[in-house]
Image (tube, helix red, strand yellow):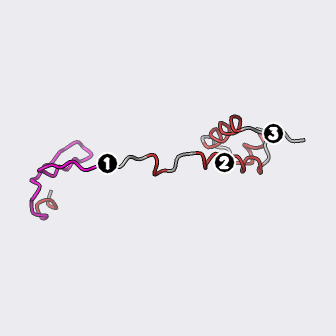
């Protein structure tokens, strides 16, 4: 008779597998799981995780009188808000 698995037992195992380098079969063999049991619990685990849209917060733009461009090097360039597009493109 197979062992009954619980969410509190399986979710940490699924999370552990996700950060491991083992494929599913190797992982299941090392934890005495069938692939069917693993797949069942992985599906439940994935459904319980927040969707990518839930991880982000919508930001409202700040009203400003200038356009500021910040380059990866940290250099900041500011131009007046109503500048001609060609000026902004030249920056």
The local crowd at label 2, few if under 14, some if 14 to 19, many if 20 or more residues have their Cα within 10 Å, is some
Disc with the residue nearer the chain's start (2 vs 1): 2
For the residues labelled 3 and 1, the Cα–Cα distance comes to 45 Å
Residue 83 on the magenta segment = yes
Disc with the residue nearer the chain's start (3 vs 1): 3
List the residue tagged with mark 1.
59
> Foreground: 70 or 6?
6
For the residues labelled 2 and 1, the Cα–Cα distance comes to 31 Å
Q: Which residues are magenta?
A: 59-86
Q: Residue at x 61, y 43 (%)?
A: 18
List the residue tagged with mark 2.
44
x then y, percent, for residue 1: 90, 41
Disc with the residue nearer the chain's start (2 vs 3): 3
List the residue tagged with mark 3.
4
For the residues labelled 2 and 3, the Cα–Cα distance comes to 15 Å
| Image quadrant in which you'd find residue 7 | top right
x then y, percent, for residue 26: 74, 45
């Amino acid at each position: 008779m197979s062992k009954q698995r619980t969410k509190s037992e399986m979710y940490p195992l699924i999370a552990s597998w996700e950060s491991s380098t083992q494929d599913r079969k190797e992982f299941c063999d090392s934890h005495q799981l069938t692939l069917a049991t693993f797949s069942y619990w992985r599906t439940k685990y994935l459904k319980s995780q927040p969707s990518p849209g839930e991880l982000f917060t919508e930001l409202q733009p700040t009203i400003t009188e200038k356009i500021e461009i910040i380059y990866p090097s940290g250099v900041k360039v500011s131009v007046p808000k109503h500048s001609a597009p060609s000026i902004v493109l030249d920056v």
